[in-house]
Amino acid sequence: PSPHSVKVELSIGRKSVATRAVSVASSGLFEWYQAVELELDLLYDDAVWEWTEEDYKAGLFPSAFLDEGVPDAYIRVYRCSGVGGLLGPLGTSLRRLIGFNRCSVRELLGVGVALPDAQGRRMESLRNDNLAQDLDCADRRNIILNKFGSSQPAFFLKDADALPPAFDPRSYTGRSKCSLDAPAWPAPRKGSPPGFPDYDDGRGNLNSLDPYIGVQDFDLERDSTCDLKDTDFPGRIWASCKVYVPSRANCESAVKGPPLLSPFTKYNAVPLPEPRHMDQCLQTFSMRCHIYQARDLPSDSDLGVANAYVEVVFAGRRARTHTVYGSNSPTWDMTLWGGQLNHLELPCLGWPGWNFTHENFEVEQITYDVNADPGTKYDDAIWRRNQHMLRFVPWIEVRVMEEGGGLLGRCFVDPRRCLSTEQDPEWRELFRGNPEQDEGGVLASIQLLHKNDPLLAAMPVELCPVRTTGAEDFLSDRTRVGRIANESSKPIFMRDCRIQVQILGLRSVSPALGLRKPSVAVYVQTADCWDAEKRLCCQFTQAKEGSDPSNQNFMETLELQVQLPDDIEYAPSLEFVVQSEDTGVATAIRGLFGGDPAEARRTVAWGSLPLADFHPQGPEQAEDAGGADEDAEEDVAAQRRGGGGAGGFGSRSDLPAPRCRSCR
């Protein structure tokens, strides 16, 4: 939120058009629901892109022209000052670029790829006679041709024609919403009611002014021309695009065709219908976020290690975990639910933008399907249909924050990937402003539960990580697991462990760090519910004074006592902190873990090793760790009792190099 407004500009070739400037809404989104149009004059070579009168009558369009004859499209998002937003084109110098996306017009239209026909020509078939409710069927209704025997599409309105009031969302006050059989745009229909004329053009390209056909989200990119801070993410934008291409008979001039009357102008004078304007297009969901742990976080604290918490932001709501102090690889092991994460009204598009033609009033409106019997299997088509209904929902932002400071890292989660009632945790890369710059990772899972889901009727039990053993493909044959674990899930057993670390010394530490009387802290941070005690899970070497602190030897053995999960997917990291004497600093990491806080030490560098690499089963067994049978469990127990052996806790010569960073 800021005093600035934001506008969007679409550019193709040398032509561009911009939306009005809008301010941020209470949901945290910038919302336009506005249609703008752009006229292009493009050279057309009949020898290259053959398009005969027979093709036109058959509803065929030369697909190669989209790829070869139309320049790429640029979507640019600008921040405008209050004055610049009011001045329109005159305020161009007052706007600042936030982000952009470059794509082909084919990608912008979302019409898929056309395959060559029997003659080797790439022709788009615009007839949608056989379209069913099939998400895999290419939908090319965003390409619009003129009507037979006319220079305009069937829905064209003359200057003397008035736009039907039913097409203007502003007229819905006190009236019913638009619906499947009475949409807010031209559509062919049987027995047209008053105010809804029949717009059938006779070619099967029906319902083409539906603004939700081909709606998609585009990631915004950033470069040096963007007016952004290092921690600013450009965002993403939801848009759909349509193109009206008149037949060759309407463009007979070889130099430039006659002026075209826009078929869109009168429709663009009114706002696009929002999901709240459309019948049953808002559904209520609740969200549960399972936050397990993070790894290799940066730090902005004076200690040089992070004091981090996780904040989840979605649809104008937010929730956060507790703060873990003194760890760059913290473990929270916490479920966020209830409160602001309940009763989320989300766009759930069950009929606009779908592949049916409105010719048949018996078409049943699609609704979100909730399986009322946990433990049974979802049908693949139902899974994909439910996901497709949430294509207009903003993404979920997971932020890792420094307590009392700023952003350490963020990631975004597509809500369409959160519909399973059981979500296996997934490591997600974190970034601040530039997605290509790694800022560690977070292990989390997120669930979106529909208001009719039976799992919402009961209090969730204490979080227990589980691993599903169903099909690997998320989109098919996923089992719905309720509050009680069954044969498709495996609780993660926590085991008392001792970790022995031999600190040999430092090598080639940069002189720029100003190291004096160095010492090393070694610790494993685990969640409180794992009964970890800080005095047992953190140990320090003695501070050493020598002639060369950058290559100081320690030759000490430290031992940590912690509880670790049997499943290496949930194993925390072993952290190292290098500290230096600093009489000007009155605090130290020692105070966080039971050491003497009066001893002035400065953290100069830190590193980490994944403890999963030291588990008895070895890292190569990570994918099968949760499904070990009884014999394998006995073998693992025998290895632990034996104190080593193949794959055990014995000495290893193939240790991975720790990931290290100097403090910011």
Image: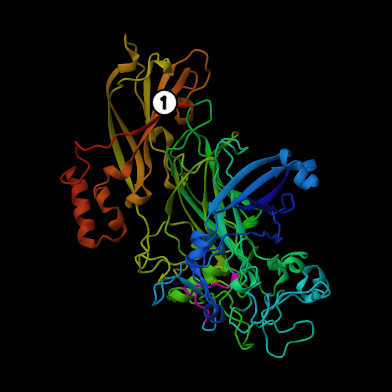
Q: Quadrant of the N terminus?
A: top right
Residue 410 percent across, percent down from the top left:
53, 44
- 37 falls in the magenta region: no
Residue 444 to residue 485: above or below: above
Badge 1: residue crowd in 10 Å (few <14, some 14–19, many ≥20): many
- Is 39 left or right of 478, judged from the image as shown? right
Q: Is residue 608 above or below residue 79?
A: above
Tell me where the magenta segment starts and ends, as one range.
131-143
Residue 241 or residue 79, whichever sits in front = 241
At label 1, the amino acid type is Ala
Residue 525 x/y as whole percent? 42, 39
Viewer-side residue, 191 vs 280: 191
Query: Magenta stretch mostly in which secondary structure?
Result: loop
Is the residue 128 above or below the residue 101 in the image?
Answer: below
User: Does the image show residue 418?
Assistant: no
Q: Quadrant of residue 361 in the image?
A: bottom right
Mark 1 secondary-structure assignment:
strand
Q: Residue furthest bottom?
A: 191
Instruction: Judge left or right: residue 20 versus residue 224.
Output: right
Image point (56%, 50%), residue name = 101
- Give coordinates of residue 490: x percent, y percent: 36, 61
Disc 1: which residue? 605
Q: Quadrant of residue 340?
A: bottom right
Residue 215 in sight: yes
- At 66% across and 53% down in the image, what residue appears? 316
For this orientation, the residue located farthest to the top is 547
